[in-house]
Amino acid sequence: MTVIHEINTAVWLTGLSERYGRRVTLGDVPEEVWDGIALPGIDTVWLMGVWERSPAGVRIALRDDALLASFRAALPDLTEADIAGSPYCVRDYVVDAALGGPDGLAVARARLAARGLRLVLDHVPNHVAPDHPWLTTHPDRLVQGTPDDLSRAPEAYVEIGGRIHARGRDPYFPPWPDVVQLNAFSEDLRRATVDTLVSIGEQADGVRCDMAMLMMNDVFARTWGEAAGPVPAEDFWPYVLPRVRARHPNLLLVAEAYWDLEQALRRQGFDHCYDKRLHDRLLDEDADAVRAHLRADPADQRGLVRFLENHDEARAAVTLPGERGRAAALVVATLPGATLWHEGQFEGRRVRPPVFLSRRPPEPVDEALRDFYGRLLGAATAVRRGEWRSSTPTGWPDNDSHRALLSWTWTHPDARHLVVVNHSGRPAQARLPLPWDDLRDRELRLTDLLTSRTYDREGDELADRGLFVDLGPWQGHLFRVS
C-alpha cells in the first residue's frame, strides 16, 4: 500500500544548505540525506512545490499585510529573501532554477528510484499565476470577465494586458488575490491539461492534483455559472485522465478532495483521494464517529489517503500532542488505503511555515517521538497485508468504556495482526472478538510490535469470549498473533 512522505522542497533545501555550508539543490543532495528519507515503510516521496514560482505572485504577497503577519508569526526573523512565493501560484510547469531545474529533478528522481522510492509532483488544475504565458497566448483557457464585473467586484476580477480575468477561487472562500481562474469547461484547457500531466508524468511517477474537486462539472457550474459557458457533456477528469493514462499507464494519481466527493473522484479515475473526514474526526470527534467512518466499503477505503498533517493543516504535535498523537498515528498507519506523512512530523515540529516561505525556524527534535515513528513505520509495513476487517469491542452493563476503543485485524496467509487503540482520555476495557475460526486447542502469543512485550493466551478463551484488553488514555497495541 502506498505510503507517501511529503517534503516542502524549498524549505528542505534551504535547511540542507545551512547544514552543509553550501548551496544544495535537487541535483546535489548528499547521499546520506536520501538514505535518511528512505525510511522503512516509505515507498513514495512527494516533493511539494518544485515548479517555477511567480514573481508577480511574490509582489502581490509583499503587499498583503495579513500574509506578511502570518509569515512573521512562523518566522520571527523573516527577511524579504525568505519569501519565495506560493508553489500553488505556478508561472510555468518547469522545475524552478532556484531548486536545481529539470536536470536537478532528474538526478533526485534517480536517487529516489535507486532506493525503491517513487516520486510525486504537484499539479494545480484550477488556476495559474497572473504572469503565466497562457494569459497572452491562450486567454480562452481562462474564465473571462467584463468591465462591469471588475467594477462590481474588484476583489474577484483583475485586468491584465487589457483583458479582464476572474481570480481563482474556491466557492466557499474569497478569491485568491495572486492567481487567475482556469476554465474547466474550455476544450482547449482540457487538451492543455492532458499535455501538462503527460509532461509531469515524464518527470515523475505520480501526480498530486490540488483541489481536484473544483474542476468537476457540477462544482464548476455552481461556482462560475454563465461566466464559464455551457457545461460540456463529459466531465473534466473523465476527459483528462484516460488520455494521460494512455501515455503513462502506471502514473499514480492522487486527488486533494473535500466535501465528501472522494469516491466520485475515484470513479472519475483517481487512485487515491484525501480522507479529510478521518483527519477531522481524529482531532474533534469520539471513537463512535471514527468507527462509523470506518464502516465504509473496504474497497472504497483502499482509495483514501490517511493523514494527521500536511502543508495545509496545523502540525500534529500541536493539534494532537503527546500520547494522543501517538494513538492517532497508530490509527492512520494501520488502516487500509494510502498513508501520508509530512516532513518534520516524525521529529515533532510545531511550526507550519506558510508555503510562500523558503525557510523555517530551528526547532528541537523530540527524540522519543522520532523513536516511536521509527518503530511504527516498520511495523505498519508488516501489518498491512491481506484482508482488513473492523472489530467491534464489547463491554459490560456497568462499564461502557469499550465504546472508546477502535480495533481491527489484518489476516494474511503467513501473518495475523490485531490493532486496538483507546481514542479517549480515560481508561477503557473491553473484549475484542477475533475473526479467526481456528483458535481452539491452541496456545497463542500476542507480541506488541511497538514495545516487544508478549502476552500468552489460551485459544479457547479467545474463541469463546474474545481478547480482554485494558488500556489507559490514548494507549494502543499493535499485536502480531502467533
Image (cartoon, rainbow, N blue to C red):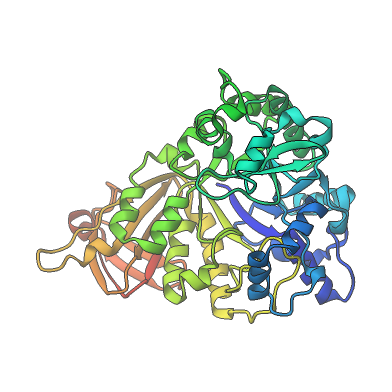
Residue 189 position by quadrant? top right
**Residue 368 at x, y = what percent?**
54, 79
Whether residue 140 is visible, yes or no, is: yes
Residue that extends furthest to the bottom in the rendered view of this protein? 364
Looking at the image, residue 75 sits to the left or right of residue 308; the answer is: right
Q: Residue at x 50, y 30 (%)?
A: 218
Looking at the image, residue 334 sits to the left or right of residue 141; the answer is: left
Q: Residue at x 87, y 51 (%)?
A: 101
**Residue 233 at x, y = what percent?**
56, 17
**Residue 251 at x, y = what percent?**
68, 36
**Residue 146 at x, y = what percent?**
68, 33
Residue 356 position by quadrant? bottom right
Residue 371 position by quadrant? bottom right
Looking at the image, residue 94 sits to the left or right of residue 319; the answer is: right
Q: Is 63 or 122 nearer to us in this picture?
A: 63
Whether residue 126 is visible, yes or no, is: no
Q: Is residue 432 above or below residue 142?
A: below
Q: Residue at x 67, y 67 (%)?
A: 65
- Count how many numbered circles sit on residues in the image: 0
Q: Is 229 or 320 nearer to us in this picture?
A: 229
Q: Is residue 455 above or below residue 187?
A: below
Q: Is 269 or 86 nearer to us in this picture?
A: 86
Q: Is 479 or 475 nearer to us in this picture?
A: 475
Residue that extends furthest to the left in the rendered view of this protein? 397
Residue that extends furthest to the top in the rendered view of this protein? 233
Quadrant in the picture for the C terminus = bottom left
